């Protein structure tokens, strides 16, 4: 009886291993379907409008703002418009950059408050003051 059981076990294992042989799949042997005929090219779409150019990093303006301008502009002291406050900056920006630069460099007293010359930073160059104005105005557009 042990011989018969052993032979049956060997036969079952042989059949199982034979099924795992290196047969080619019928799917692999079948030829690939022919590609679909090419469709007519779609009409060219109108080019997308160009995205606005990203504002370049204004490190000079950011630095001057942080060291000098933020003393008043961060909290709105003496009517100083806060960067990002579109309602406060809008009318100022509408006057043009030359006017903003002039008021920041020479100083200005208006209905909403006063701007000391060079923001109180007497050693700031005109270009540094302009960069700081640009930095604040760019955040408020």
Image (spheres, grey):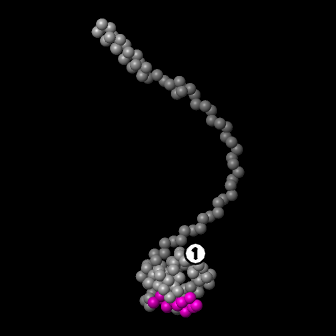
Nearest the viewer among 11 and 128 is 11
How many marks do you count on the picture?
1
Q: Is residue 131 left or right of residue 94?
A: left
Question: Quick one: SS at disc 1?
Answer: loop
Residue at (56%, 26%) from the top-left corner?
A: 30
Nearest the viewer among 25 and 3 is 3
For this orientation, the residue located farthest to the left is 2
Residue at (52%, 27%) from the top-left corner?
A: 28
Nearest the viewer among 130 and 65 is 65
Nearest the viewer among 52 and 65 is 65
Q: Is residue 99 left or right of residue 59?
A: right
State the residue position of label 1.
Answer: 141
Residue 77 x %, y %: 48, 86
The quadrant holding residue 71 is bottom left
Q: Which residues are magenta?
A: 109-120
Placement of 29 over or under 38, stated as above or below: above
User: What is the quadrant of the C terminus in the image?
Assistant: bottom right
Residue 122 x %, y %: 44, 91
Regarding residue 111, the answer to whether it shows in the image is yes
How busy is the neighbourhood of tag 1: few (under 14 within 10 Å), some, or many (20 plus)?
few
Residue at (34%, 14%) from the top-left corner?
A: 9
The quadrant holding residue 108 is bottom right
Residue at (31%, 12%) from the top-left corner?
A: 6
Placement of 38 over or under 66, stated as above or below: above
Residue 140 x %, y %: 55, 76
Regarding residue 128, the answer to whether it shows in the image is no
User: What is the quadrant of the N terminus in the image?
Assistant: top left
Placement of 33 over or under 124, stated as above or below: above
Q: Is residue 135 magenta?
A: no
Q: Is residue 119 left or right of residue 91?
A: left
Residue 81 x %, y %: 53, 82
């Amino acid at each position: 009886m042990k011989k018969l059981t052993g032979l049956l076990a060997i036969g079952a294992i042989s059949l199982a291993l034979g099924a795992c042989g290196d047969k080619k799949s019928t799917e692999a042997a079948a030829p690939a379907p022919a590609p679909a005929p090419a469709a007519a090219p779609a009409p060219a779409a109108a080019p997308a409008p160009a995205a606005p150019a990203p504002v370049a990093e204004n490190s000079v303006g950011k630095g001057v703002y942080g060291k000098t301008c933020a003393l008043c502009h961060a909290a709105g002291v003496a009517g100083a418009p806060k960067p990002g406050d579109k309602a406060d900056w809008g009318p100022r920006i509408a006057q043009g950059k030359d006017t903003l630069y002039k008021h920041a460099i020479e100083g200005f007293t208006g209905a909403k408050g006063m701007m000391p010359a060079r923001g109180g930073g007497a050693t700031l160059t005109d270009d540094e003051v302009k960069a700081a104005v640009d930095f604040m105005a760019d955040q408020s557009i």
